[in-house]
Amino acid sequence: MTTIQDNAAELPALIGLVQQVAYDLPAGYAISAGSRFVEDLGLESVNRLMLMTLVEQEFGVSLEQHMPALIELQTVGDTARFIGSLRAGR
């Protein structure tokens, strides 16, 4: 099983992208691997679409064909693992 530590390159970059689309975070809120997109970060569907576009650009992956899996991703860490698996060709 892939761990968040296995995706050390993806996690910090992904957190930076999430910060770009999470407009309503309280001052000083630290996004982490365990941050949930809806419950903790308050991302709405438009924010998640923006994030998807940024992820494709940053990591050079195509996400359109993975929509069913993307819908299931709840946390930043889940998403980092998913991106890592795409980049590794798994």
Image: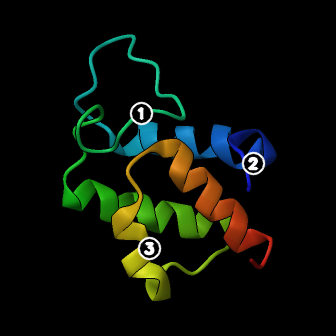
Alpha-carbon neighbours of circle 1 within 10 Å: few (<14), some, or many (≥20)?
Answer: some
Residue 1 versus residue 28 in the image, above or below? below
Q: Amino acid at mark 3?
A: Ala
Label 2: element kind: helix
| Frontmost residue, 58 versus 31 | 31
Q: Is residue 16 left or right of residue 67?
A: right
User: Which residue is at 19% across, 52% downward?
Assistant: 44
Q: Residue at x 24, y 44 (%)?
A: 38
Q: Are marks 3 and 1 in contact (CB under 8 Å)?
A: no
The alpha-carbon separation of the residues under discs 3 and 2 comes to 18 Å
C-alpha gap between disc 2 and disc 1: 16 Å
Disc number for residue 35 = 1
N-term-proximal mark, 2 vs 1: 2
Q: Can you give x and y, in whole percent of width and height, for residue 20 in the image?
A: 42, 42
What residue sits 50% from the left and 61% below the top?
A: 54
**In-image side of 16 versus 52 (left or right):** right
The 10 Å Cα crowd at callout 3, few under 14, some 14 to 19, many 20 or more, is few
Question: Given the image, on which type of amino acid does mark 1 rest?
Answer: Ser
Q: In the rendered image, which residue does mark 3 sit on?
A: 69
Q: Quadrant of the C terminus?
A: bottom right
Q: CA distance from mark 3 to mark 1?
A: 18 Å
Amino acid at pointer 2: Asn
Q: Is residue 66 left or right of residue 10?
A: left
Residue at disc 1, secondary structure: loop
Cβ–Cβ below 8 Å for labels 3 and 2?
no
Return the residue at label 2.
Answer: 7
Q: Position of residue 31 (x, y in %)?
A: 46, 27
The part of the image, by quadrant, that contains residue 59 is bottom right
